[in-house]
Image: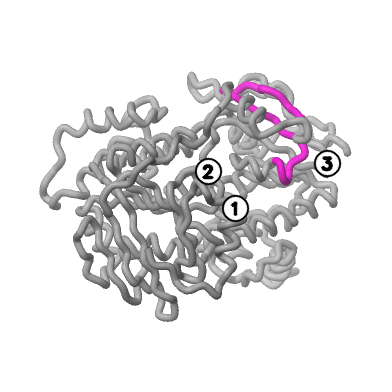
């Protein structure tokens, strides 16, 4: 292996905030190098310097032994550095092919854009990832996972020698993760270097060779993955041992606050029933795309049920109800919905924390009834949830992923919501913030709340919940206590398709 990238003594400050302090980092050909640390540790800033988005205040970058000044992302791409950031950069109103060649479109002999070449080369790059996508398809029609793969395919097409993947699996299901891992291994076999930024421990130990850990903008250390255990790596990241990632489970459940009876998610689906009690966290588990999200979104009218009955705290919701009015109706009954994509569907990124939380207070009032004296409420929420921000006027976009998630949860806590339906509670959140969010959710149920949660991380569902329903082919096929559940038992239940639908 040869060294492709060397970064020496990199420092970077934004105003008075010293984000990086004399950090050194190197990449070898044919290797997958994990870059880890809590949110705010400096990982993304270091990689944005390598990607030409930011320029360092001090230090130097060498590629293949030659000092370079990367003044723009185009400079970085021309130098063989391709980046897939957690916040997607594709333009939704352009096609996949147009995004792949944006700013470097091939030309015909007459000087016109060679669309045939763009489509041909785009299809070849997509084929390398096993993606059956039409290169002429608009990006706006793609799922989050498909957009992630298109960005990775962009780097493959550009024949980059270094691929920076920032939370590459946050929006991928298990099958897509394996496709990604296969693609990463192929890149390494071709001598490429991959920087892998993730908060998922199992992925780091499965795919990476080396790990560099940052904390508070400083280098903690670099070690071979084979020399580490997950607990040791966590200690390096947070500066302390997390003796228990998940808080203790509930010892008793109260009254039923949410009941689904004889629900058919689609015309051909078998009916399902489900109950949720005060004081408990119930998980929807199973293979990706089996109906978990349809079920969660049916509660707010974003998925139209074929038949059945929904009862919230004894009140029967008349079906059907639309996504426009559904969320209002359920919020008035004290049910809050936290979507998977907090940036697109949950938060107003350009607005301050204050306004994002106060929206929750307004949502349960009449349109002309204004909320007064809300600042103390927001201050209490920020303090109790340990939201790390200068003040309540800080824009939500400026916060880390973990703090953005806390603000979204805080919206419903401020509104005195007592039922939460949560998709992907810790997507893109570091290990320390995960522990805090798990604690907050458990405290919410200890105070009489109830939570229905779904996540792509089966271990998260097992550790966080009290009970699990296993969903397969748009129905519930099993129910089990979380303390007795294992990944194997959940998968076994999900794959036994000959079972009759489960009734709670």
- Where is residue 171 shown, x and y percent of the image? 55, 54
Question: Which of the pair 468/135 is nearer the observer?
Answer: 468
- Mark 1 vs mark 3: which is more N-terminal? 3
Look at mark 1 in the image and give the residue it sits on. 487
Look at mark 3 in the image and give the residue it sits on. 29
At 14% from the left and 36% from the top, the residue drawn is 372
- Mark 2 vs mark 3: which is more N-terminal? 3
At 43% from the left and 51% from the top, the residue drawn is 467
Look at mark 2 in the image and give the residue it sits on. 428
Residue extending furthest toward the right = 1
Q: Nearer the viewer, mark 1 or mark 3?
A: 1
Instruction: Residue 392: tell me if it is visible.
Output: yes
Q: What's the magenta region?
A: 205-223
Any magenta on residue 218?
Answer: yes
Marks 1 & 2, CB-CB < 8 Å contact: no
Q: Main secondary structure of the magenta part?
A: strand
Query: Which structural element holds mark 2?
Result: loop
């Amino acid at each position: 292996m040869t060294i492709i990238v060397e970064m020496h003594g990199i420092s970077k400050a934004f105003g008075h905030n010293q984000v990086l302090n004399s950090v050194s980092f190197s990449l070898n050909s044919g290797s997958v190098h994990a870059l880890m640390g809590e949110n705010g540790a400096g990982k993304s800033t270091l990689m944005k310097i390598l990607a030409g988005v930011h320029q360092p205040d001090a230090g130097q970058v060498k590629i293949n032994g030659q000092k370079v000044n990367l003044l723009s992302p185009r400079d970085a791409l021309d130098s063989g550095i391709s980046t897939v950031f957690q916040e997607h950069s594709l333009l939704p109103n352009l096609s996949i092919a147009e995004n792949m060649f944006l700013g470097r479109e091939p030309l015909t002999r007459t000087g016109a854009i060679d669309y045939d070449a763009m489509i041909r080369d785009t299809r070849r790059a997509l084929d390398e990832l096993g993606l059956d996508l039409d290169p002429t398809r608009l990006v706006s029609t793609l799922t989050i996972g498909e957009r992630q793969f298109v960005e990775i395919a962009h780097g493959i097409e550009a024949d980059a020698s270094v691929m920076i993947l920032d939370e590459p699996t946050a929006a991928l299901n298990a099958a897509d993760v394996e496709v990604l891992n296969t693609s990463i291994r192929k890149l390494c076999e071709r001598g490429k270097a991959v920087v892998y930024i993730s908060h998922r421990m199992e992925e780091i130990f499965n795919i990476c060779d080396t790990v560099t850990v940052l904390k508070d903008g400083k280098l903690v250390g670099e070690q071979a993955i084979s020399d580490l255990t997950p607990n040791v790596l966590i200690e390096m990241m947070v500066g302390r041992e997390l003796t228990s990632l998940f808080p203790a489970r509930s010892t008793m459940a109260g009254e039923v606050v949410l009941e689904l009876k004889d629900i058919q998610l689609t015309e051909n689906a078998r009916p399902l029933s489900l109950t949720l009690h005060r004081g408990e966290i119930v998980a929807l588990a199973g293979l990706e795309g089996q109906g978990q999200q349809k079920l969660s979104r049916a509660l707010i009218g974003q998925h139209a049920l074929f038949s059945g009955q929904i009862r919230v705290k004894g009140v029967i919701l008349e079906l059907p109800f639309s996504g426009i009015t559904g969320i209002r109706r359920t919020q008035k009954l004290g049910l809050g919905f936290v979507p998977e994509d907090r940036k697109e569907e949950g938060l107003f990124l350009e607005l301050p924390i204050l306004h994002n939380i106060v929206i929750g207070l307004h949502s349960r009032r009449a349109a002309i009834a204004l909320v007064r004296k809300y600042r103390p409420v927001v201050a209490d929420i920020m303090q109790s949830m340990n939201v790390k921000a200068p003040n309540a006027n800080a824009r939500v976009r400026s916060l880390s992923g973990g703090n953005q998630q806390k603000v979204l949860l805080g919206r419903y806590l401020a509104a005195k919501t007592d039922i939460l339906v949560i998709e992907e509670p810790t997507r893109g959140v570091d290990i320390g913030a995960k522990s805090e969010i798990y604690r907050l959710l458990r405290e919410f149920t200890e105070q009489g709340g109830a939570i229905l949660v779904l996540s792509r991380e089966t271990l998260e569902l097992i550790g966080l919940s009290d009970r699990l329903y296993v969903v397969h082919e748009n129905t519930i096929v099993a129910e089990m206590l979380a303390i007795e559940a294992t990944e194997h038992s959940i998968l076994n239940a999900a794959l036994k398709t000959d079972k009759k639908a489960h009734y709670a």
